[in-house]
Amino acid sequence: MAEISLALKARSKAPIEAEAICPDTLTGKSPSEVASISIWEGNRKIKLGDLFEIHGSTGETPETTSIVLEGDLSRIRRIGREMTRGKILVKGSVGFYLGEEMSGGAVIVEGNAGSWAGACMTGGTIEIKGDAGDFLAAGPRGSHRGMAGGSIVVHGSVGSEAGCWMEDGTIRIGGNVGIFAGIHLSGGTILIGGEAEGMIGAGMTGGRVVLLGRTLSILPSFFIDDIRPTVKVGEEKVTGPFYLFVGDVTEKGDGKIFVSKEKNEHLKIFEKYLP
Amino acid sequence: MELLIRNGFLYDPINGIDGEKVDISVRDGKIVDKVDERKAKVVDASGMLVMPGGVDIHSHIAGPKVNAGRLFCPEDHRTRVRCARCFRNCEVKTPITRSGVGCSIPSTFTTGYIYAGMGYTTVVEPASPPLKTLHTHEELNDIPIIDKTCYIRFGNNWIVMEYLKEDKIEECAAYVAWVLKAVKGYAIKIVNPGGVEAWGWGGNVQSLDEEVPNFGVTPREILRGLCKVNKMLNLPHPIHVHANGLGTPGNHRLLLETMDSVRDLRVEDRPIIHLTHAQFNSYGGVDWDSISSKADEIAGYVNTHDHVTMDMGQIIFTQTMTMTGDGPFEYLLHKVTGNKWMNVDLEVEAGGGLVPIQYKRSNYVHAVMWTIGLELALLIEDPWRIFLTTDHPNGGPFINYPKVFAWLMSKKARKRTVDKLPRLARVRSNIAGIDREYTFYELAIVTRAATARALGLKNKGHLGIGADADISIYDIDPKKTDPSVDYKTVRKALFKAAYTIKNGEVVAKEGTIINCDVGRTFWVSPKVPEDLTKSIMPELTEKFKEYYTINIGNYGVPEGFLAKSEPMEVESEL
């Protein structure tokens, strides 16, 4: 696999829209050609070469191209936008909209990611070893479409509204989540390893949220349905036991929330409502 | 500044010019007989199509509800428009133009740029409540290049309804004239007469003879009353009516009744009622499953009665936004689609709502709607009485007009879309059986000449001596192109005007803006006897105190507020 490395050499005050950093765009270009691609910094156009030290080579097809980014890229947005194949490795943190609308390929971030990571993605994988911001995998504001496929793994914590309007795919979160995880969920699975701040699955109509840690309360628009010993997330089996809540009834939904029984002893009061 | 346009094939229906090679001379923004060839700037239009600048009679481009739509649908800012210019989701700033976003509800500047790029030079915002017209003018001022104006809504105005109830038609006329003058409006717009007021109580009116709650007038009386007022004031445009029952199956009867309700008021020389986005009012059937096209009946009526004009309200299969003053209809749409909904009630005057919608080819109802718009345009024989609109953005963004041009001009283009419709819609529609194809001459009528004439803008829509030098030139040879076969070429060429000339200046070239100025805002100032206006003022002041949250002195828009004010004095018959 041909590898091209882009090491950040300048720091920008304005946000940078770098949708050009994507295997589909860089494929077949020499480092000097890559350096001459123009991107937007705030309201002016700059060259990729102004920002990065570029070495290595790209493959002939996106599949054989691997992009390695180095440095603190937290002001750089839309890396890997609409990527279909190939690989991006970020040795540092990235800004907003990582892998927006991507449909294939792999992105690995060794630091943190900004908000809207994996926004509206339909395929491929994103792995974030640090934390991710708000609106993980959500669509743009106002839109009723979120992630529709693929998988996201976040080892750290995630902000609010993770998986907003998600339709399909899997999100695995190792750490804690903010409020409204899985809001408006209609399909797919969200696995939360840590604690959830609350209001999980508000307005969900389908899909599943699995919570291994503690949460303060469950929304009153959900009702308890069962206690399950295990739950399947993708191929793996997660052992519980879990309280199963179904809702959101305000949306006539059939979404499922699995909440760890061990970690949530205060939810025991719901057991008397078990059917 | 002199300009000479040479060797173009001119289509100027008002002057009866059908594709002749005519040179056009322009001096100081007006068409003149002759200019000095050596001094004038020459635009070579050989092998090109030359038309007067486009005049759009109904397009929601400014005002509070348009802005509400922008706020309410931030995702629209990111919708990508597949257009001939590029594949884009934003307008990038250049030294001349400003940046902007939006597809179904573009930002104000972008609206002006896209219209000018398409060769349109006059556009009307069709529904501005008087109280909010200050906002409308604020946005109209920001729309560059094109000339514009706005209609003022009176159909559910309490004061109008009270005058009509008491049969004080002259006082009503004086009041309407006072409002038009105060807020700088152009014509009387009636939205679902009575129905929007009833919506304040959670209802709607189902027929023309149902009383409006608390007012004791019927929609028929409102229509007839305002039609008489319009005649008395001698306004340049007839009443602009969004009929009752819009968007519900079986509403064609209401449309026929609405047209018929003012038939006896007809005058010899011009239409007295304009039915806007008639497509939304031409449905047969009893429910969504049995909804069908009644365009043939409507067209039959229009063909035999000359007091009516119409515009299409064609829908386009795309994601768009519906915004109308018809509150109950928007609620219905929200219930049907499940999409987000916004409702507005404005004190004394109006209401409204917004719901985003996606028109899908595979949806039977949408397919029927699509056929109705085209059937109306093709079955109404006189192109001077049916105009091309998509009721932007309700039927589809105006950026899609070239698609409609292609459907009108080519049976082949229609067939290509019809083939993709659901079988039931295909079987129940007779669109495939219509052979008529618009010529360039007829296209110039429905997009320019007829609309300008209906608006009463004497210097627009034609290129005779003395007319405004608003000219659009398209890079297509009308003598060599057969639009019925090469509809794709037509669509592409008409999307991007080779030259758009506004007030004698080339403003756009190949669809790109090269010169940016502020357009004029037209408004009417009807002359009403002073003692009549004076006689209604005490009562009006009382009503303002009682009904409004603002003082009568703070009502209206000062003339200095308009970027380029263009008042039109009209002699009333009062």
Image (cartoon, rainbow, N blue to C red):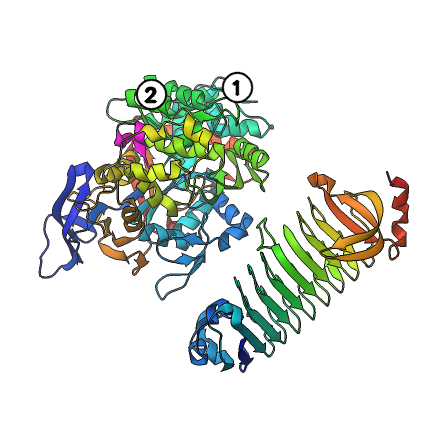
Residue B487 image-quadrant placement: top left
Q: Is there any visible trace of residue B154 in the rendered image? A: no
Magenta stretch, residue numbers: B378-391
User: Which residue is identified by label 1?
Assistant: B211
Chain under label 2? B
Percent x, y of residue B189: 41, 33
- A150 up-or-down from B146: above or below: below
Question: The residue under label 2 is which amino acid type?
Answer: Tyr
- A193 up-or-down from B284: above or below: below
Which quarter of the rendered picture does the C terminus of chain A lie within?
Answer: top right
Image check: A197 left or right of A90?
right
- A207 up-or-down from B162: above or below: below
Residue at the spot x=24%, y=22% of the render? B268
Tell me the element at label 2.
helix
Image check: A172 left or right of B407?
right
Question: The residue under label 1 is which amino acid type?
Answer: Glu
Chain under label 1? B
Tell me the element at label 1.
loop
Q: Nearer the viewer, mark 2 or mark 1?
A: 2
Percent x, y of residue B563: 36, 52
Percent x, y of residue B446: 28, 37
Residue at the spot x=51%, y=28% of the render? B158
Q: Residues within 10 Å of mark 1 (few under 14, many from 20)?
A: some
Q: Residues within 10 Å of mark 2 (few under 14, many from 20)?
A: some
Q: Earlier in the sequence, mark 2 or mark 1?
A: 1
* Front-lying residue, B573 or B473: B473
